Image (cartoon, rainbow, N blue to C red):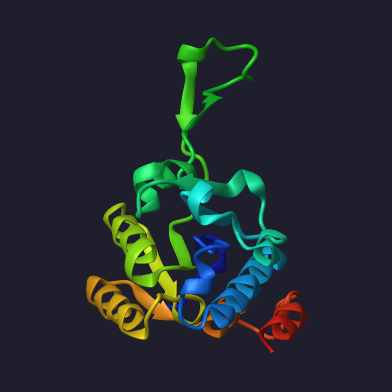
């Protein structure tokens, strides 16, 4: 199964100013997160981010923040972003549309609710892999999202914690991928209009 760009959104977890200096190979993980955000932007895919206790752990790293929309940053207190309303943000509420005629000509009780467009494939990366990334990914699975974790854009304080998180995620049914895999699967073809842009970002 390949990643479907039309069903994808990108979720970047806790790339914060006081978190990154404490984690293993943070620079490489942050660089790949920025590439993912720029690729998603080029393809017009939704990009969400989280900040855990930003009053204590700082805001999102400025280099990544430049590619994010402030309205799509969820500040959280729980390790899993799902506990702080992530699912409700990713799945917008139904909106009412008229059964016939137009909205002005029909009372609300005659208007039928229609589900908003949903994206069920979450491309997920962040810090720390064994805590906030892991717990968010497992709860997204419970909510019936397809979850793909980008391993080379994740980190933890130690390699052992990071690798243990990947083992557990894979065992739970999360797909483990790399930044390049995501980019090329979003494109599917060198004929894609954004191919040159993404190729430059990847290389």
Residue depicted at x 35% and y 54%: 80
Q: Please state the horizontal and vertical placement of residue 175, each as a whole percent of the image.
A: 36, 76
Residue 39: quarter of image: bottom right
Which residue is more in the foreground, 24 or 149? 24
Which residue is more in the foreground, 39 or 52? 52
Q: Quadrant of the C terminus?
A: bottom right
Residue depicted at x 39% and y 43%: 84
Asked whether residue 11 appears in the rendered view, the answer is yes
Residue depicted at x 51% and y 77%: 153
Q: Please state the horizontal and vertical placement of residue 139, each as a whole percent of the image.
A: 30, 56
Tell me if 127 is positioned left or right of 21 in this view: left
Q: Please state the horizontal and vertical placement of residue 132, each as a whole percent of the image.
A: 37, 61
Q: Please state the horizontal and vertical placement of residue 60, each as a whole percent of the image.
A: 60, 58
Tell me if 176 is positioned left or right of 7 in this view: left
Q: Quadrant of the N terminus?
A: bottom left
Position of 176 relative to 108 (above/below): below
Asked whether residue 118 appears in the rendered view, the answer is no
Total numbered labels: 0
Tell me if 27 is positioned left or right of 112 in this view: right
Residue depicted at x 29% and y 61%: 138
């Amino acid at each position: 199964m390949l990643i479907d760009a039309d069903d994808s959104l990108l979720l970047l977890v806790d790339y914060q100013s006081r978190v990154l200096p404490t984690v293993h190979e943070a620079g490489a993980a942050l660089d790949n997160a920025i590439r993912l955000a720029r690729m998603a932007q080029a393809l017009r895919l939704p990009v969400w981010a989280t900040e855990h206790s930003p009053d204590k752990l700082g805001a999102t790293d400025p280099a990544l923040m430049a590619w994010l929309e402030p309205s799509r940053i969820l500040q959280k207190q729980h390790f899993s972003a799902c506990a702080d309303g992530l699912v409700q943000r990713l799945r917008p509420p139904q909106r009412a549309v008229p059964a016939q005629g137009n909205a002005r000509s029909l009372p609300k009780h005659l208007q039928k609710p229609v589900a908003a467009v949903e994206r069920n494939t979450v491309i997920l990366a962040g810090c720390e892999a064994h805590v906030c990334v892991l717990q968010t990914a497992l709860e997204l699975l419970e909510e019936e999202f397809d979850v793909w974790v980008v391993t080379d854009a994740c980190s933890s304080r130690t390699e052992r914690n990071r690798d243990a998180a990947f083992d557990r995620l894979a065992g739970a049914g999360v797909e483990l991928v790399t930044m390049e895999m995501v980019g090329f699967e979003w494109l599917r073809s060198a004929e894609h209009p954004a191919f040159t842009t993404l190729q430059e970002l990847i290389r």
